[in-house]
Image (cartoon, rainbow, N blue to C red):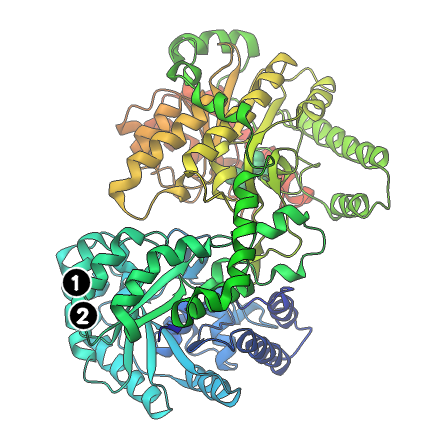
Amino acid sequence: MALIHNLGFPRIGAKRELKFAQEAFWKGQSTEAELLATAKALREVNWQAQQSLDWVPVGDFSLYDQVLDMSFTLGNLPVRVADLEGSALDSYFRVARGRSANDSGCNCVHAGEMTKWFDTNYHYIVPEVTTKTRFSLNADRLLEQLAEAQQAGVKAKPVIIGPVTYLWLSKAKDQSNPLELLEHLLPIYSELLETLADAGAEWVQIDEPVLVTELDSHWRHGFETAYHALKANRVKLLVATYFGTLRENLQLACNLPVAGLHVDAVRGRSEIAQVADWLTTNKVLSVGAINGRNIWKTDLNATLDWLEPIAQKLGDRLWLAPSCSLLHVPVDLDSEENLDTDIRRWLAFANQKLDELEILGKAINNGRHTVAKQLADNQDAIDSRRNSVRVHNPLVKSAVENITEALGRRKSHYAERIGKQRSHLNLPLYPTTTIGSFPQTPDIRKARLAFKKQEISAQDYHAKMKAEIEHAVREQEKLGLDVLVHGEAERNDMVEYFGEQLQGYAFSQYGWVQSYGSRCVKPPILFGDISRPEAMTVAWTQYAQSLTDKPMKGMLTGPVTILNWSFVRDDQPRSQSCLQLALAIREEVQDLEAAGVNVIQIDEAALREGLPLRKSEWQTYLDWAVESFRITANGVQDETQIHTHMCYSEFNDIIEAIAHMDADVITIETSRSDMELLDVFEAFHYPNEIGPGVYDIHSPNIPTEEQAVKLMNKAAERIPAERLWVNPDCGLKTRQWEEVIPALQNMVAAAKTLRANA
Ligand code: GLN
Ligand code: ZN
């Protein structure tokens, strides 16, 4: 008998109940007891949804973040929160977000650093350690959830983060290697496992996703040390790996002295047979056969085709599961009221994935005939997607096939283009610009909502947006900026706005996925070949240009960013979808150019986050990502100036690819890094122009003229002044006009000072 189990379930609730409860608590509108009651109710619903499983994850529920939970379990709190008054939950939220409910003044601390959980869009709170860090067990949260689950009558399997992964995710504040703490950490893990055993846990899932990354010999050795130390404990350990293949760590993972191993059979299917061979007969193999990272239905018959021989071989030693925690998919397709019926048939959210798992389990254990109807229905859905004319557009496919290298190449080299652009645009030294958006005021959001609900006409909505654009243009003229933007008032979101206008995209109503804390994203669903029925931004940009003699910058989101922030197709490589997006956005670039727009910015905010987990795969990704950008951007005349924008500050390992994009101007986030990040541009002799942000838009603080001048002078030590622009770090949509105006006044004043002193 194969068993079915799950690695983790989304905690936000089908209608984001957790988000609203958290935010109400933080604002002081509800009590701690009320927040905890909502959390408890959500856990009950989640366990109900997972009732059919042989093992149900417990402890995967979190009030903010599972890594922060682990830090609390291990007694690893930053000292800055230790002596503040309040409950344990107050401390927890102070580490998570700098403050708890009703905190003001003295109880505010700086929040823990947040970073991406492997290659997902989930962000965790980075554990802070030093060589002096010592741990102590606090199992209350886990024990409480375990007891609740037992009471709810589910077979509970506690989930924790493994010791090696925990240290690997940690950041040493004193430059030491967190791995050195392993010997201090292991006794606490032992104690935790014993405590869980006492509380009735038979299995514990211990997540070690770092096993799918490139590990040096110290970290590999850390695995051996850790699991030999933990093997004496009474619980059975299921080491869970996910998000990729094990490769050189395969043998290491298989040989760990534990009771079972979970592997990602979506990304790592090619390794399953080998893992099944390597595992000794006393160990369970958990096969992650259903994609926990995407929203498509599983092709169950095809899955059974490769799974059945493995099941034969493993018998009782086979467990089935999603590839990873379902944290990364929306909760329930049944919540959707407006999804097109075709597309709905092709999808599975968390609840539907559990149904699939149950069908797989029955087919394996009792034969396919016992679930013949479900398998036939699944096959129909799979076939309908595979053959749909809505998915396949032969024109788009042939356009991608006909892409040549020339398509992504500018007509002339930058050195030649720049002269033509300068005389055309007539820009001063240290030209000033902004990154695109101006404040999305409550007024703008209200108008958009009213338009969506059909309470106001399209005409009224457009008139309102035009008024906003005019306001933004007038303000920029008053400020004396050199290259203006229209302000993006009409855009809800930089990806959704384009997705809504492209063929091949669908949108859910409740397809939310947790990004961090109470923040959720609703990635659009890229389901088919991408085409652009008509121009998407030209009318707005043209209108904005008609209001001013200054150059107006057209504003687009690039193909790589659109791709990386969407749920994408699993029936073709990501690179194919990206090239299709590139061709569609290229048409927009060319329409803008034809409409007389001489400066066009193509944002690639998410280019870096698409990098694969393993460095050995980076180049392949960068090749097609950069090629996609080049195809989008580079089909223009020499006089047309292409900008790109990336709001992060790590370019060291990708500078060559960035240079190969060949944008005339790149604007980047630098104000927090004191311009040191330009070192890599200098060392690489980056040839084109750079706008290093001098205004940290994430902070409400107004930068002064002196600060901006100082930063730009540092920049000019590294990059020749004639190749520098003066601009903020990122778009201004989250700020208020009252902050933006004085900040930009200072920024423009700084540019004038710089010119005068040049
Ligand atoms: N043009 C976008 C804006 O200004 C860029 C946003 C981003 O980089 N995240 O809002
Ligand atoms: Zn940005």
Q: Do the residues labelled 1 and 2 touch (CB within 8 Å)?
A: yes
Crowd band around label 1 with a 10 angstrom C-alpha radius: few (<14), some (14–19), many (20+): some
Quarter in which the N terminus is drawn: bottom left
Residue at 34%, 20% (x, y): give it. 687
The reply to whether residue 716 is visible in this rendering is: yes
Asked if residue 241 lies left or right of residue 302, the reply is left
- Disc 2 target residue: 256
Q: What residue type is labelled 1?
A: Leu
Residue at 59%, 34% (x, y): give it. 389
Residue at 62%, 17% (x, y): give it. 591
Spatial separation of the CA atoms under disc 1 and disc 2: 6 Å
Q: Does the residue labelled 1 lie within 8 Å of ligand 1?
A: no
Crowd band around label 2 with a 10 angstrom C-alpha radius: few (<14), some (14–19), many (20+): some
What percent of the width, then of the height, locates residue 708? Answer: 48, 35
What percent of the width, then of the height, locates residue 644? Answer: 48, 28
Quarter in which the C terminus is drawn: top left
Q: In which quarter of the image is residue 720?
A: top left
Disc assigned to residue 64:
none
Q: What residue type is labelled 2?
A: Leu
SS at circle 1: helix
What percent of the width, then of the height, locates residue 464? Answer: 81, 36
Most extreme residue toward the bottom is 198
- Disc 1 target residue: 252
What percent of the width, then of the height, locates residue 267? Answer: 35, 51
